[in-house]
Image: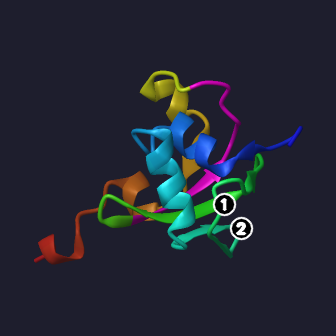
Amino acid sequence: MADGQRLDLFLWYTRFAKTRSAAQAIAEAGTLRLDGRRIDRAHACVRVGSILAFPCHGRVRVIRVEALPNRRGPAPEAQACYADLDPGAAKGVDAPSAAA
């Protein structure tokens, strides 16, 4: 994987999972999509430009990989490795139930 990185490592390095085994569980659960394909293996290859969609903390996260991290660093370093594609999260829109 010279131009890519294992999916479980990417999820762990970018702090979507607290441990590598938790990242493996996310990848193997069958609920994660990589470029529109359902993934059920932790060793799937993630590349710059890949789109990931997966459930995380009660909502579906959709992100685009901007860079491949070399380590599990601080949160700002991890957040620089992906772009959040959820338009509601980026604009800070209130939840539909909160609208009156």
Q: Closer to the camera, 97 or 30?
A: 30
Tag 1: residue type? Ile
Q: Say whether residue 85 is left or right of residue 42.
A: left
Which residue is labeled 2 in the image?
Answer: 35
The answer to whether residue 24 is seen in the rendering is yes
Q: Which picture quadrant has residue 71?
A: top right
Q: Say whether residue 32 is left or right of residue 66.
A: left
Tag 2: residue type? Asp
Quadrant of the snapshot with the C terminus: bottom left
Is 25 located above or below residue 32 in the figure?
above
* Residue 97 is covered by the magenta coloring: no
Q: Residue at x 61, y 41 (%)?
A: 9
Q: Position of residue 20 (x, y in %)?
A: 50, 41
Q: Give the range drawn in magenta.
A: 60-71
Q: Are marks 1 and 2 in contact (CB under 8 Å)?
A: yes
Q: Closer to the camera, 31 or 92?
A: 31
Residue 51's tag is 1
Is 27 located above or below residue 75 in the figure?
below
Q: Say whether residue 73 is left or right of residue 91.
A: right
Q: Which picture quadrant has residue 69?
A: top right
* Residue 65 is covered by the magenta coloring: yes
